[in-house]
């Protein structure tokens, strides 16, 4: 079954919310993609909460080493195999069921996060513990299917996906009978469901994977036109379809209901070599400053400071509703990292952050500002955006939306305000100097 969802149907922001009984709502476990963190589910969780879902029944798995092995059968330090990934999900399901007393949970995965969901349900006993599986942008038939890198879990002709997609049940389905499955995909705008391999550094290679690569026989297959590889999980339209699939009705709203005094927490994490990890960065410190929304300038001394311990936790921090903040991370071996973010409407304990390193190519600049969008990519011609007045922002070009960062190198000396804008969000940062080993990020929530 294929369902094509128009934005006018899926987006219900501002509609009145019907009061709902919080009892009976199943626990939901969200599983992020390759190299990502649980923090990407922040706005999805806020939208569930805004529709009456209890906060204590919403969980986001943070895989310690989130990157896949180059060859799934060969050990690779700091990376996980498909078997290890399955065990992480199985352990989290058991933990959540014990904590909540629920017989079954809902699993929601983005990209690589869908593989352990399918594998757990098929091979790990999940058919008896999972009611619904929602797979957003999951490369179910591979990013490519052929002779290139045959041992990768992302090869549709490789051992892992060949086994996972082998027919099941009397109808020869690609999904496991007994669990309800839904896939969410783009029409043509998913960077990892393309006819050529340009987004994996192989532009001349035919992938033998179609735009419908994420769809599965036996699932409800939903198309979100124009959405990119991450938006098919993290966009408001994806939330609306996920909510509908679980409950049988569209949500009362897709906007986020603000709280009067958000409480924030999360981990500081780092890298192992060049690979990002979600392991705590013990000994790192964080300073939080309230800043002017108009200029990015600090409005006084730090409102929160913390040197993190073995757990990496930098909070709790009691934020002001609607306030803009600058987060400054200090850690040995990293640049002094300044992160400016959209205001926080609600509380969260998954405000995870990583410091960055200064790239060799940027060391001659006066200042380096990176505009980033963790929950989606920048689409030239699709999105309204600019960085310091540049439209499109540096490094972005028309075509498939496939980049979530735009980096601006300023040669000028001194510190000034720099404006980043994206589809109605506006973040103003300060151009801290590279000469002091500083990097600057403008991070959009939506």
Image (cartoon, rainbow, N blue to C red):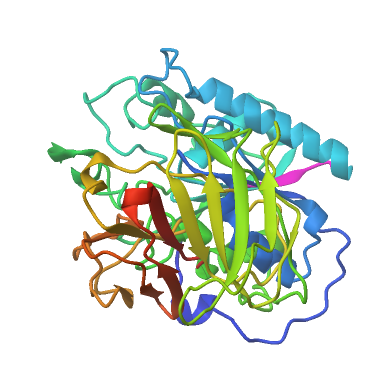
189 with respect to 169 (left or right): left
Residue 285, image x, y percentages: 61, 44
Q: Residue at x 31, y 57 (%)?
A: 368
Residue 287 falls in image quadrant: bottom right
Q: Is residue 370 above or below residue 418?
A: above
Residue 12, image x, y percentages: 58, 81
Please provide the residue range marked out in magenta: 103-108
Foreground residue, 336 or 227? Answer: 336
287 with respect to 21 (left or right): left
- The answer to whether residue 175 is seen in the rendering is no
- The answer to whether residue 373 is seen in the rendering is yes
Q: Would you say residue 16 sits in the magenta stretch?
A: no
Foreground residue, 400 or 66? Answer: 66
Q: Residue at x 56, y 28 (%)?
A: 85
Predominant SS along the magenta part: strand
Foreground residue, 176 or 319? Answer: 319
Residue 226, image x, y percentages: 34, 68
Q: Is residue 252 above or below residue 278?
A: below
């Amino acid at each position: 079954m294929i369902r094509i969802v128009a934005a006018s149907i899926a987006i219900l922001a501002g509609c009145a919310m019907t009061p709902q009984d919080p009892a009976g709502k199943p626990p939901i476990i969200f599983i992020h993609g390759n190299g990502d963190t649980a923090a990407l589910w922040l706005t999805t969780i806020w939208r569930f909460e805004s529709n009456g879902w209890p906060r204590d029944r919403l969980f986001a798995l943070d895989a310690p080493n989130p990157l896949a092995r180059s060859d799934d059968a060969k050990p690779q330090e700091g990376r996980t195999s498909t078997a290890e990934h399955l065990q992480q999900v199985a352990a989290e399901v058991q933990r959540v069921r014990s904590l909540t007393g629920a017989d079954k949970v809902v699993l929601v995965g983005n990209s690589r996060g869908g593989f352990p969901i399918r594998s757990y349900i098929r091979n790990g006993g999940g058919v008896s513990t999972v009611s619904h599986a929602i797979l957003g942008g999951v490369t179910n038939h591979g990013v490519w299917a052929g002779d290139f890198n045959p041992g990768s879990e992302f090869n549709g002709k490789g051992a892992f996906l060949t086994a996972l997609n082998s027919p099941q049940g009397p109808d020869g389905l690609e999904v496991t009978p007994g669990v309800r499955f839904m896939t969410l995909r783009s029409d043509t705008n998913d960077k990892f469901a393309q006819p050529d391999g340009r987004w994996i550094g192989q532009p001349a290679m035919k992938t033998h994977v179609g735009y419908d690569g994420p769809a599965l026989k036996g699932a409800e297959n939903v198309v979100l036109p124009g959405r990119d590889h991450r938006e098919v999980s993290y966009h408001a339209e994806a939330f609306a379809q996920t909510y509908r699939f679980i409950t049988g009705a569209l949500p009362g709203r897709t906007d986020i209901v603000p709280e009067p005094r958000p409480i924030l927490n999360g981990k500081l994490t780092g890298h192992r070599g060049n690979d990002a990890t979600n392991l705590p960065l013990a000994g790192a410190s964080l300073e939080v400053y309230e800043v002017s929304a108009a200029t990015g300038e600090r409005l006084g001394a730090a409102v929160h400071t913390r040197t993190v311990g073995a757990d990496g936790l930098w909070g709790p921090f009691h934020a002001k509703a609607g306030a803009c903040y600058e987060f400054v991370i200090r850690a040995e071996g990293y640049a002094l990292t300044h992160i400016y973010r959209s205001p926080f409407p609600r509380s969260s304990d998954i405000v995870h952050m990583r410091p960055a390193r200064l790239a060799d190519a940027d060391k001659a600049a006066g200042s380096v500002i990176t505009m980033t969008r963790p929950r989606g990519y920048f689409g030239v011609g699709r999105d309204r955006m600019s960085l310091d007045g540049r439209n499109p922002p540096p490094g972005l070009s028309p075509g498939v939306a496939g980049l979530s960062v735009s980096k601006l190198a300023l040669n000028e000396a001194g510190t000034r305000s720099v404006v980043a804008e994206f589809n109605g969000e506006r973040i103003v940062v300060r151009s801290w100097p590279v000469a002091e080993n500083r990097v600057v990020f403008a991070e959009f929530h939506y």
